[in-house]
Image (tube, coloured by chain):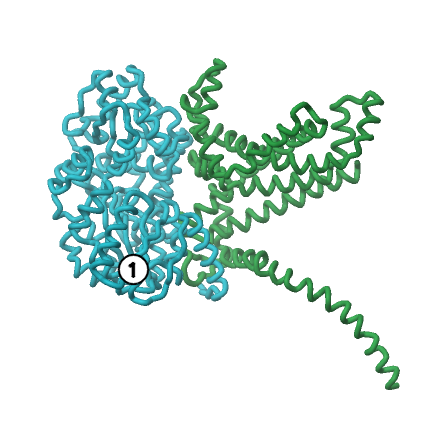
Amino acid sequence: MRVFDTSGAARSAAVLLAVASVLSACGTGPGSSSGDGTSLRVQIPAGPLADRMQQVGKDFEKANPGTEVTFESVDSNSSRGPNVALLSSTATPDIGYLQRSTGVWSALLKNKQLTRIDDVWKAARLADKYSKSQTAYYTTNGHHYGVLYEELLIAPVYYNKEAFAKAGIPDPADHQISSVAEFESMVARLKAAGYQGLGVGGSSPYDLGHTLDALLPTGVSESDYQALLTNFKPGSPTNVKYTDPGFVNTLKTIQDWQKKGVFQQGMLGMDTTQAQALFTSGKLAMLQGGNYSYADLKAAKPSFGMGWFLLPPLTQGRTTPFDAFNGDTLVIPAKASNPQLAKKFLEFFMTDKYQVSVVAASGSLPVFTSIQPSRLSNLGDLVQQQFELSRSVGLVNIWDSTVPSTLGQGFAVPVLQKLVAGKLTPAQAAQQFQTGLENLRSGKVSGATD
Amino acid sequence: MAARGRAPVAAQGPRRKAHTFPAFIVVPALALMALLIAYPVVESVRISLGSWDGIGPVAYRGVANYRRLIGDSLVRQSIVTSLVFFVGTVLFTVVIATLLANAINRKVPGARFFKAVWFLPVIVPVSVAGVFWSNSFQPSTGVVNTVLGSLGLGDGHAWLASPTTALIVTVFVAVWTQTGYAMLILLGAMDTISPEVHEAATLDGVSEAGRLLRITLPNIVPMLGTVTTLMSVFSFNAFGIIYAMTRGGPGNATSILPVLVYKQSFIDQDYGYGSATAVVTTLIVSVIGVLVLHLFRQQRLEA
């Protein structure tokens, strides 16, 4: 394979175009990349965290007189792809935001565009504060290139208490449903009471993937699940396949739910926001969400009380664990103007104090295992319950955002949409996942090397 | 000899100036075209011949991406979807725009008002139109289903959830956004036809439909060709409306080629493969553009 260099002018033009498009999309412009050691540009995801981070910036400026922190937000779509052009350019912010499972991380790491931050990890004692799996996920060849700053709990199902009462369904004990049969029976009763069943944002780029994520940990054995999280890496064992009965049965359950009318009408044409609106309007009895959905649901001021539970286990006798997304990452790009100041900021931010006052206060969950649920009074009642339950039923890493997006979210959601639309049988869909895995392992598609 | 030798030199002075001046004027335009059009196209072709994740050097792989394209069922499906979308959008846009322009040109009551109303969708941002129509086509809560329900046709149609109807809906919205633009261009062409021609035809007892077919259309063939070519290009590049409404789904049912290019490049970080798909897309659009122009040139000659 021959390598030819993209000429300087070509690269500049491409970077300029890409940066312009990214910046125009998020409505911000690059600050002064002076490299003066006093000004710091920090990229953060658009959303509730953005407001809370302003306080961190002020605190940092106060603790480090003469410094100036500016925040630039990046939207979800850009952060999953186009943002790579900005983070690898000379116009990069000093601290960048990305999702660990996307190609942005892989591309930056592969091309040595991330600053090694072992010293930040050491100073902030992150290896002691994260769980073992989180530390392993953020360790590449013994080194660290990013910090995980929040954890998201995926796929709790919020329900309309009024609808459950009308259908004569008691609140699920311990937030668990014992079996698929029981769940389907609940849906039938809710529909008889005049409600639609389970709302999922089927046209969004992630929601249907979260349904798979919620069912898969109990659809296969624990060891097989662990294998599915890692077997995309070249050289890893290949004995667990996506065509195995457990995975096929998980897909079949999702397709069956569509056939049985478990999902809301028109699920595949509805995005997450539209599904939420249908739920808060009182027409939908249940909504698949995340801990991050609760603030939006409450803000819509529904006329009914809400509860929540986890989807049923696919294997009798097992308890559904909570899915956790551990991908929200801050990195220091290699071309950052003020890398030392950026490291100082990350050390400053990655503390118990801000995990509680910023991360938890914006509706996300702290990542440090040392922080007990009892210390958090600002999560909101239902999220507090979710956080507590996650400590007792256990957490598993979400499948579709742990494997690279060329097999996970980016690849999986269209396949699931075809499955639900009846264009693929469960076996055919499973074969597509297996082919996707083989393409990843062979290097035919990118993402397997990080 | 010397005098004879010098004479042509003296004569060449003004002639050279005459050649130099236009070239001097043309050079900036050529330089801009080279920088803004030729260079990106050449770069795209070059990236399509390699593997590139958006950073650093492009690893040259010859025509491997093009070989992969041939065997990729998603690409084949996207080509078919693009062609269906193109035919549906262009056909309906041009026919409806022609009828609307003709009605305004014939001064139907409220012509000026309708002219403004029909042009309004053109100025609505594509993302806004996409969100608006996406909500409007939702079962039970959308405006479209509410209207159908009030007519006794049921309000539970899940238009965007079915691969077949989702494509039809996106064609409808694309037509809605483009028709006003096409109408305005065609109206300009119709306005150049002398009113006396229509008056004479009316005196000869030619009906409205007859005048449209035998007078108006033959006189606007060149502009119809231009509009059809423009609409063809617009429909092949209708990324915004599709992405705002369906993101190419359900599955890949509405994934026209630009949506696929976006996914390959920005989601999969496979810019080489995305560029190869983009190059093929450009070739398809070029062929269609040439065919459309050729077709209308023939029509013009026959007219």
Q: Quadrant of the N terminus of chain B?
A: bottom right
**Rendered shade, chain A:** cyan
For chain B, the rendered hue is: green
Q: Position of residue B93 (x, y in %)?
A: 61, 33
What residue do we see at 64% from left, 32% from top? B97
B298 versus B164 height, above or below: below
Residue at 30 percent across and 42 percent down: it is A400
Q: SS of the residue at dot 1?
A: strand
| Host chain of mark 1 | A
- Tell me the quarter of the picture where residue A61 sits: bottom left
The answer to which image quadrant residue A215 occupies is top left
Q: Quadrant of the C terminus of chain B?
A: top right
Q: Count every numbered label the image shows and give the total.
A: 1
Q: Residue at x 51, y 43 (%)?
A: B257
Query: Which residue is at the front of the view, B109 or B215?
Result: B109
Residue sticking out furthest to the top: B152
What is the three-letter code of the residue carrying label 1? Glu
| Mark 1 closeness class: few <14, some 14–19, many ≥20 residues within 10 Å | some
Q: Is residue A15 above or below residue B75?
A: below
Residue placed under numbered mark 1 in the picture: A68
| Observer-nearest of A272 and A428 | A272
With B14 as the anchor, is B103 left or right in this view?
left
Q: Position of residue A162 (x, y in %)?
A: 24, 20
Q: Nearer the viewer, residue A94 or A231?
A: A94
Q: Is residue A216 visible?
A: no
Q: Position of residue A289 (x, y in %)?
A: 28, 34
- Above or below: residue B151 compared with residue B89: above
Image coordinates for residue A362, horizontal then vertical, percent: 24, 42
